[in-house]
């Protein structure tokens, strides 16, 4: 080995000057501006300067945003969670069945009506925790790929939701329970959840371990991290957040149906990926996902605003997710080449 | 009948083969980031001979074989096959041109039959264009009869023993009717009887005029089967000789004969009490009855060739893959180490062999890489990492080790190998270990970083840390160690004191 190539390799390199989230924020601003311009051209009005539109937009995505906060942690740990949409449906059903008013004659549990709001809330979170435990245990200890494990729970939990009342919807929640889905509550809950887990991922051991495992599970193990136990925690948290989202959905609609939350997991994954969370693990942040969520919302409400047919919207949504993943893979490959 | 022109062409090829051998390569150079793996290397394989390749770990044998088999492309140099200059663009291309390789790691498809594995891509078809399994079984049976292999062509590969799989690999390679057959450590998983069978096959192939390249670490095999051998050292060609004209010691001298530079600043420091004692550590099928002691301030070098299972012993000590039997005593007390966390609780630290696979968190920054082990045990309050504190510690340690980076928020994938290595060493030094296990501490890093790391290891020993250092570089082992333990195929084959050790003695123990 000659001494020239040594000095070349240790020479300081220029580094990224701002956090990765800034890039995503720029993308958001760019997309919003495009819709603003298109708005003036095709609709003769502003897209952004409508308080009502922005409110609806953020309300639309907040529920899935709550799920995305959990999914972000799972993806950073190097995994994936496909079961969150089904957890939304199942928890909507289960929690709602403990949140009904006594004045309704055909309650699921006639003896258990008019319960304080905390009861269905805890039951719902508990249900989520159980699904998360199953996911985490399957992935960490039986070593099946997360994709397969959570695909299994996705189908099973959806089946449970349908079986729970043999397909009947559950309605008439107490005022207390309905409150968690009322007004801007979904947005408030999302902001709380996002803030808590942003801090957790950045400043606590839980977060550091999650990143470490996603970056290199073997190295994490050698560093003394109990990788298996930690992964269980990550999947439990993700499923509990999906459960919370399920209760917000049910409370907002004041009714629960087994089909609720269908394909939410994909939208949540999309938000994370658009927000810069790498599907290869070890990279991304809750803040990025939050921005990704807003991008997602802007695109959907932008298309609606431009009166684009809903069918086109779905097709374009799919293409955007694929594009975000391609961009991520491309970035990784470029990094690998330069390093 | 051949036309005179064709006959002349055949003669010319024949003449070229007589002169250059069936395969002749020259001036081959291959560089990987930070490492010059092969430098102006040559090799000539004559038809109908077995040509052994010899050299220490990292001498460049495997890299050269991968170039010949089309896996890597050389940066410079010429490959002539049957007298013609060829480019081998891929393994498939090499195979089509008449070069087969039997890889060290078996590359069979477990869930397919023996016959399917052998004829994949060349399956006989019936009139409907579907695979003719009966014909395929017949072809396999013919092939096996020729090679004297007794195996059912329809058996599923997953049900075969390792030796049987090895035979299938060999049959597969032979079935291509290649002119050159490369065997990389083909006997590593075979019993003595199976080795005899393999050698019978090799002699038969030699008879048919095939040129065989044979990589081995086993001296006696060399003398039993090889006609010629070529020695490589540090990516350079040392020489080619007829196997009949040399002795074992000659070969070892050729393999190790290099100057020891003064880049190993070993200072003698007082050696204290025994801190680690290992008794009969065994992981069946991997290593057996490994026993040694390690004392405060001592650097115990662990040498051995590929397949000696040195790293597996280290992994067992640190609880990554625990041993199944045997005892580990720390300060004279038997301890159970079933996980890295337990090993760390006993004051151990483990710098793994493969920086990228088991060391670095490439997507994370320098600070996080340094802190990962520390925060599993301390500096956390109510789940929150005491960031200011650990940052200070990490920064100080990075400065002490002279990590070169614009700043410590830099993502580690952007750092050079030497600096990544320093970060990993920093990670473990922050945990204040009493027992430090280093597996190839200077592999793939530049000379400057290397001597800094050597100085550091010596300083740690002077502070009373007990060091177990695995290294494939004999000069490093000799320069740094107070004592050297040599392993051979999962067994400890001997200990050497600093005073008596030299390269030849180590290689004699390692190559048995």
Image (cartoon, rainbow, N blue to C red):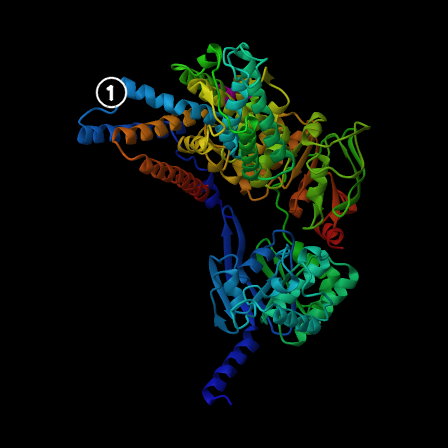
The reply, left or right, for residue B448 in relation to residue B487 is left
Place residue B159 in its image quadrant.
Answer: bottom right
- The residue drawn where x is 48% and y is 12% is A174
* Residue A228: image location, x then y, percent: 63, 31
Magenta residues, start to end: A199-204
**Towards the viewer: B470 or B163:** B163
Q: Nearer the viewer, residue B419 or B71?
A: B71
Secondary structure at numbered mark 1: loop
Q: In this figure, which residue is indicated by the disc labeled 1?
A: A49
Can residue B256 be seen at all in this image of the molecule?
yes
Q: Does B195 appear in magenta?
A: no
Mark 1 residue crowding within 10 angstroms, few (<14) / some (14–19) / many (20+): few
Q: Position of residue B405 (x, y in %)?
A: 47, 32
Magenta span has A202?
yes
Chain bearing tag 1 is A
Seen from the viewer's position, the closer of residues B141 and B494 is B141
What residue do we see at 56% from left, 13% from top? Answer: A119
Residue at the spot 56% in from the left edge and 16% down from the top edge: A122
Residue name at image x 48 percent, y 13 percent: A177
Query: Between residues B378 and A215, which one lies in front from this camera angle?
Result: A215
């Amino acid at each position: 080995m000659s001494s020239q190539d040594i000095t070349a390799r240790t020479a300081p390199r220029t580094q990224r000057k701002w956090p990765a989230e800034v890039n995503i924020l720029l993308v958001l601003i760019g997309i919003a501006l495009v819709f603003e311009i298109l708005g003036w051209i095709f609709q003769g009005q502003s897209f952004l300067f409508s308080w009502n539109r922005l409110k609806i937009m953020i309300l639309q995505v907040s529920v899935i945003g709550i799920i995305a906060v959990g999914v972000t942690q799972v993806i950073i740990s190097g995994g994936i969670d496909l079961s969150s949409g089904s957890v939304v449906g199942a928890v909507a059903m289960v929690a709602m069945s403990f949140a009904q008013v006594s004045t309704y004659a055909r309650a699921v549990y006639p003896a258990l009506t008019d319960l304080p709001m905390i009861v269905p809330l805890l039951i719902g979170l508990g249900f989520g925790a159980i699904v998360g435990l199953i996911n985490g245990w399957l992935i960490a200890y039986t070593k099946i790929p997360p994709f397969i494990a959570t695909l299994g729970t996705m189908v099973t939990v959806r089946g449970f939701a349908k079986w729970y009342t043999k397909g009947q919807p559950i309605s008439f929640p107490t005022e207390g329970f309905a409150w968690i889905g009322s007004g801007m509550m979904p947005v408030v809950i999302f902001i709380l959840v996002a803030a808590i887990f942003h801090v957790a991922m950045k400043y606590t051991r839980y977060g550091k371990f999650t990143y470490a495992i996603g970056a290199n599970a073997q190295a994490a193990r050698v560093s003394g991290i109990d990788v298996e136990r930690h992964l269980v925690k990550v999947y439990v948290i993700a499923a509990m957040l999906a459960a919370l989202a399920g209760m917000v959905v049910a409370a907002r609609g004041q009714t629960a149906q087994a089909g609720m939350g269908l394909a939410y997991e994909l939208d949540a994954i999309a938000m994370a990926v658009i927000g810069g969370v790498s599907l290869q693990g070890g990279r991304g942040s809750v803040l990025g996902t939050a921005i990704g969520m807003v991008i997602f919302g802007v695109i959907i409400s932008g298309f609606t605003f431009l009166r684009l047919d809903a069918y086109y919207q779905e097709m374009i949504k799919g293409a955007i997710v694929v594009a975000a993943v391609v961009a991520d893979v491309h970035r990784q490959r470029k990094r690998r080449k330069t390093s | 009948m051949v036309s005179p022109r064709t006959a002349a062409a055949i003669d010319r090829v024949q003449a070229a083969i007589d002169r250059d051998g069936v395969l002749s390569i020259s001036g081959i150079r291959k560089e990987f980031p930070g490492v010059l793996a092969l430098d102006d290397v040559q090799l000539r394989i004559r038809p109908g001979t077995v040509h052994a390749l010899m050299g220490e770990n990292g001498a460049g044998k495997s890299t050269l074989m991968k170039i010949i088999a089309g896996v890597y492309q050389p940066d410079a140099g010429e490959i002539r096959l049957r007298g013609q200059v060829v480019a081998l663009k891929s393994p498939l291309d090499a195979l089509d041109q008449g070069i087969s390789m039997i890889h060290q790691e078996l590359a069979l498809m477990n869930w397919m039959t023996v016959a399917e594995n052998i004829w994949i891509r060349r399956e006989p078809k019936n009139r409907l264009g579907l695979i003719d399994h009966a014909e395929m079984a017949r072809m396999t049976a013919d092939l096996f009869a020729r090679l004297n292999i007794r195996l059912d062509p329809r058996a599923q590969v997953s049900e075969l023993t390792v030796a049987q799989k090895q035979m299938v690999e060999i049959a597969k390679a032979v079935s291509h009717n290649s002119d050159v057959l490369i065997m990389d450590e083909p006997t590593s998983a075979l019993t003595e009887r199976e080795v005899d069978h393999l050698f019978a096959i090799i002699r038969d192939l030699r008879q048919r005029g095939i040129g065989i390249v044979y990589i081995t670490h086993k001296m006696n095999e060399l003398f039993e089967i090889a006609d010629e051998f070529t020695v490589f050292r540090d990516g350079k060609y040392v020489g080619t000789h007829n196997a009949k004209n040399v002795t074992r010691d000659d070969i070892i001298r050729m393999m190790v004969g290099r100057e020891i530079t003064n880049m190993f600043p070993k200072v003698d420091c007082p050696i204290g009490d025994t801190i680690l004692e290992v008794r009969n550590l065994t992981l069946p099928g991997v290593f057996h009855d490994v026993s040694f002691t390690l004392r405060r301030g001592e650097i115990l070098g662990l040498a051995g060739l590929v397949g000696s299972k040195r790293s597996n012993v280290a992994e067992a000590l640190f609880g990554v893959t625990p041993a199944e039997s045997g005892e580990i005593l720390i300060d004279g007390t038997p301890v159970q180490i079933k996980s890295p966390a337990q090993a760390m609780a006993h004051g151990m630290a483990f710098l793994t062999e493969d920086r990228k696979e088991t060391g670095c968190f490439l997507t994370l920054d320098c600070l996080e890489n340094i802190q990962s082990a520390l925060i599993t045990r301390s500096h956390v309050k109510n789940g929150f990492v005491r960031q200011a504190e650990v940052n200070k510690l990490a920064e100080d340690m990075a400065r002490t080790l002279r990590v070169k980076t614009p700043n410590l928020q830099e993502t580690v994938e952007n750092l050079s190998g030497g600096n990544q290595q320093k970060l990993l060493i920093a990670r473990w030094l922050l945990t204040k270990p009493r027992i430090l296990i280093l597996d190839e501490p200077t592999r793939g890093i530049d000379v400057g970083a290397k001597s800094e790391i050597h100085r550091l290891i010596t300083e740690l020993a002077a502070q009373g840390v007990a060091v177990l250092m695995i290294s494939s570089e004999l000069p490093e082992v000799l320069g740094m160690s107070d004592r050297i333990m040599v392993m051979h195929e999962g067994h400890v084959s001997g200990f050497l004191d600093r005073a008596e050790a030299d390269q030849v003695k180590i290689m004699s123990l390692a190559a048995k």
